[in-house]
Amino acid sequence: MGNSEKKKSSIQGTLLMLDGATPHVAVPVQALRDGEVIVTALSDEGGRYQLLDLEPGRYQIRCQVLGGYVYYEKSGNGRKWSYEQVRERGREKAGNQVEHRKSSLPHPGAVSPARHTSLGDTLTIKPRKILENIDFRLAPFKKGMWKTYTYLDGLASNDTHAIYCDSDGVMWFGTSGGVSRYDGKEFATFTTRDGLPHNEVWAICGAPDGVLWLGTKDGISRYDGKKFTNFTTEDGLANNHVTAIHSAPDGTMWFGTGQLSIAGSGVSRYDGEKFVNFTMEDGLAHNTVMSIYRAPDGMLWFGTFGGGVSRYDGSEFQNFTAKDGLAGYSVSVVHGNPDGTMWFGTWFCGVSRYDGKEFVNFAVKDGLADNIIHAIYRDPDGVLWFVTGSAVGSASGMIGGGVSRYDGETFVNLTAQDGLSGSR
């Protein structure tokens, strides 16, 4: 063990509500040194956090909340600073440092730069020491209420794989027990008895003509509101296990096949008459395709399990992997913003943002609830929501996932303690 490792220290404390008893769960807590984030940790089910492996020195501690940060202060519960206020303090500090270098003599009546730019208290950590009881007392900041629907309400199964909202505002849920339709009042469920090829429904997509396409464990199904028409490998489909569906503006349908431990056979394109299949031999990154997305520029993106992500321009594939900066090789979901920025959710490696030039990655160490990503959604306000976690276990080792809200600056995580039916 080197001398540097021997000197490592840590900071720990709890995040509780103002009653001093109710914990704030899955809240990102950060240690900063000279304005730079050194380490981030999530508070656990009891509100406890630990910032480990810190070099001796002076630090500020803050936690991420809606719209900004709360910095630790010994004398109170901490003060919230908006993103712009934090940036302004940083600019002021940089300006004060320049002025200080110009003259070591303060101007009469000048305010001390250190006091003027202070964001919370500065804590000094000594070698091989644990700084304890660095606690926050915060009012609840995760607003809203959750309503949970289960099989007791009429849902086909609690094991839900896909969600789709049609043009009439009707919700469709693909489950392990069939597909359920919810009109805001009651559920109606369709199964193999109604014509589905299999009760495990992994993907749902609506076409421009109003037809609904369903991807199942045993082929795809076309539902026109009256009957199901099924297609399998016998009709030219690449593989019967379909987990991703995309509808192009011209009505052409795309189907991704395979899932995790179930090997796929690439993607299928269907023009209403015949299937055309694409595999690794054609340049696809991997034959197990878990997600399909069409960008505003018309490019098709395919998230694969084990091969990274493929971009298809109609003629050839261009592939991106961890070697190019992508967070991981298994891409479970692909999402695009209106400005063309792409987001890729991975298994075990968090999310990647791609602006067409470089990747920027986010993981538990940055405040994300878990490194396994199931879905990405952008709300009307431009806020991104990430569905995380796994039934296998927590990538963070603490929370086990939940929903992460990202406003472009910080993450706010919601778990079972906040009203979710579960965190995985």
Image (cartoon, rainbow, N blue to C red):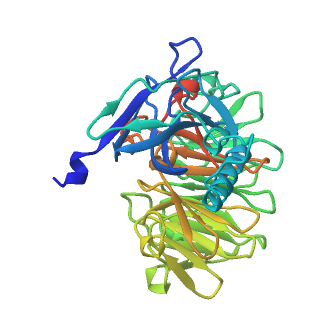
- Residue 397 horizontal side relative to residue 205, left or right: left
Q: Residue at x 64, y 65 (%)?
A: 342
Q: Residue at x 65, y 41 (%)?
A: 112
Q: Residue at x 50, y 28 (%)?
A: 25
Task: Find residue 262 and report its horizontal and vertical position in percent.
Answer: 38, 59
Task: Find residue 418 and report its horizontal and vertical position in percent.
Answer: 58, 26
* Camera-nearest residue between 6 and 316: 6
* Camera-nearest residue between 9 and 23: 9
205 lies above or below 284? above
360 lies above or below 56? below
Task: Find residue 329 and report its horizontal and vertical position in percent.
Answer: 42, 66
Task: Find residue 242 and report its horizontal and vertical position in percent.
Answer: 52, 60
18 lies above or below 173? above
Residue 347 sits in which quadrant? bottom left
Q: Residue at x 53, y 70 (%)?
A: 237
| Residue 372 visible in the displayed image | no
Residue 300 sits in which quadrant? bottom right
| Residue lying farthest to the left in this orientation | 1
* Camera-nearest residue between 222 and 100: 100
